[in-house]
Amino acid sequence: MGDAYPRRIVCLTEEPTEVLYAIGEEHRIVGISGFTVRPPRARKEKPKVSAFTSAKIDQILDLKPDLAIGFSDIQADIARELIRAGVEVWISNHRSVDGILAYIRRLGAMVGAGEKAAALADRARANLDRIAAQAALLPKRPRVYFEEWDDPLITGIRWVGELVRIAGGDDVFPELLEEPLAKQRILADPLEVVRRAPDIVFGSWCGKRFRPDRVASRQGWADVPAVRDGELHEIKSPIILQPGPAALFDGVEALHAHIAAWARR
């Protein structure tokens, strides 16, 4: 009897690749996103066929996929082209920590590896609980501004704010965390950050290097506690802006390390 589950999967973003490798189902992947860095061997083993907003449709079709997996409205055009070409497509749209955990379980079920995926999700949940317990012991909580892009200023997406909270901090733009689209999290007035006086600024400029010097030199930002105290830290995009396992392990741990160091200073 043949395998009833998809055997030729194209991953249009990084998180399905990371999950499938983590649960030992990487043999099903025939193509990946060019932005994939986790796990490192995926880049050596699998052809890169997509960016985030564009894809090599002909190359993907040559791979004869029986499933393409992507993320969010930003990949709607890629999905439409593949659907028109007869490819089955799953575009997930989770935006929260609970959503990431559910995504891991769903993806595992889709490839017949539900138990292995559930075990991965359980490990991630246990890691979050461990970090939260450590954070609860800190003597104080910092006010945190997370910057996803610098021109224009875009604040962090929901799962990032949730991870900041788990790690021991409080996001200074809680009202924007619920906004799923980046354009809805643009700060019209950069001085609003100054008014909210974050103790720590985390930057993850979606694929380019964070520049603390540029943040510190912004008009009117000299008196921001984070700028004054040199608490301007980069969190690498692959471990925080991908809605997959990386954020629930390396991402939250990186946030907590900086927050704990600040709280104990």
Image: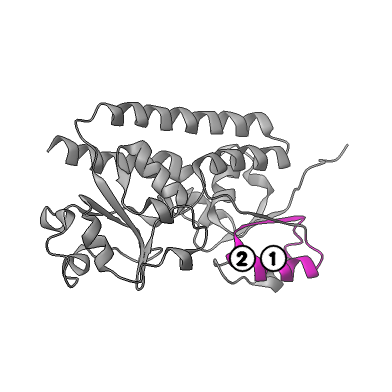
Q: Is residue 161 left or right of residue 69?
A: left
Q: Secondary structure at mark 1?
A: helix
In the picture as drawn, the residue positioned furthest to the right comes out as: 1
- The answer to which quarter of the image holds residue 118 is top right
Residue at 48% over, 33% down: 124
Quadrant assignment, res 162? top left
- Vertical arrangement, residue 119 with respect to residue 210, above or below: above
Q: Is residue 26 left or right of residue 143?
A: right
In-front residue for pair 81/32? 81
Name the residue rendered at 65%, 67% in the picture: 76
- Where residue 75 is drawn, which disc sits there? 2
Q: Indicate the secondary structure of the residue bearing disc 2.
A: helix
Quarter holding the N terminus is: top right
- In the drawing, does residue 202 fall left or right of residue 98? left
Instruction: Report the amino acid beneath label 1.
Output: Ala
Residue 201 screen position, x and y as percent: 25, 54
Magenta residue check for 83: yes
Which residues are drawn in magenta? Answer: 62-87
The answer to the question of whether label 1 and label 2 lie on touching residues, with beta carbons closer than 8 A, is yes
Residue 41 is marked as none
Q: Residue at x 68, y 70 (%)?
A: 59
Judge by depth and name the residue closer to the eye, 49 or 74. 74
Q: Badge 1: how crowded within 10 Å, few (<14), some, or many (20+)?
A: many
**Residue receiving disc 1:** 79
Q: Residue at x 29, y 31 (%)?
A: 135
Q: Position of residue 234 (x, y in %)?
A: 28, 55
Residue 42 position (above or below residue 208): above
